[in-house]
Amino acid sequence: MNNFVKRTLSGIGFAAVMLVAFLTNKYIFGAVMLFSLVVMMWEFLQMTCGKNYRYSQILSILSGATLFILTYLYKGFNFPGRLVILAFVPMFILMINSLYLKDKSRFGTFANLYASLIYIAVPWSLLNFAVFNSEGEFNGILLLSFFVIIWGSDVGAYLFGMSLGQRYGKKLFPSVSPKKSWIGFWGGLFTAVLVAVLLNLAGIFTFKMIHCIAMAVLLCITGVYGDLIESQWKRHYDVKDSGSIIPGHGALLDRFDSALIAIPIGIIYLVVMNVL
């Protein structure tokens, strides 16, 4: 019961912070998302690199934060887009730094510093394209809708998976996540589409219904892959959670693993279809 109460309270607190970030103004959004990025990169690097290459870990996080900040300034404050390329400077410093490492016995671990940029910093920086229009005006409703669909998919997958999948369904990806089942996946897909339709009918998800349904399908599928990708990292390094910043829930990376893949795909869909 104590763990349930702890999980419930921390979950409510987490949801409240996210709502404030999406529904208030661009300054709070930028601060919360930048903090989340730094924490997720730190969690990932602690899991994969441990105490090795501390200075290089800081450089990697600095590189990711620079990319997010410059993208944020470009989309929200009319910062010259050509200067976003400055984000590559700390990345190059990180690469050069690898030449001066005294202990190269675990040099393969160094690749995780680059992985943290591709896996976390790049997709997280794309969130800015979902909240700012071409004039730099802030509106977090679209990004909030993305998260609501992903969370709805997770809830549906859990309910269907726990009630039916463990007894009747085939496992979805047993080598990576033994508990996930195909019944859970289809339940999550159904819930994601249902949530997207309801958001559309409520006037929140304002695209044409066909786009709302298509994005729900994409967000669900890619969200599952995002979850599985992080599960593979954790299984390889034999950890249950990537961290413990959220009591009863684990790490921020554990909470955002689906979004790191799903939301960039949703944004790409809208851009390609010329509706964003």
Image (cartoon, grey):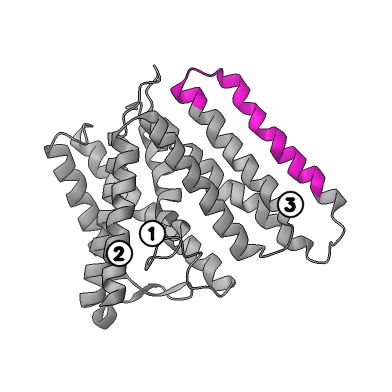
Q: Which residue is mark 3?
A: 55
Residue 185's label in the rendered image is 2
Residue 70's label in the rendered image is none
Q: N-terminal of the two: label 1 or label 3?
A: 3
- Amino acid under disc 1: Val
Observer able to see residue 19: yes
Q: Which residue is mark 1?
A: 224
With 136 as the anchor, is 242 left or right in this view? right
- Amino acid under disc 3: Tyr
Secondary structure type for disc 3: helix
Mark 3 → mark 2, Cα distance in angstroms = 41 Å
Q: Quadrant of the N terminus?
A: bottom left
- Amino acid under disc 2: Phe
- Residue at point 48% right, 73% down? 240
Q: Quadrant of the C terminus?
A: top left
Secondary structure type for disc 1: helix
Front residue of 220 and 36: 36
Q: Residues within 10 Å of mark 1 (few under 14, many from 20)?
A: many
Mark 1 → mark 3, Cα distance in angstroms = 33 Å
Q: N-terminal of the two: label 3 or label 2?
A: 3
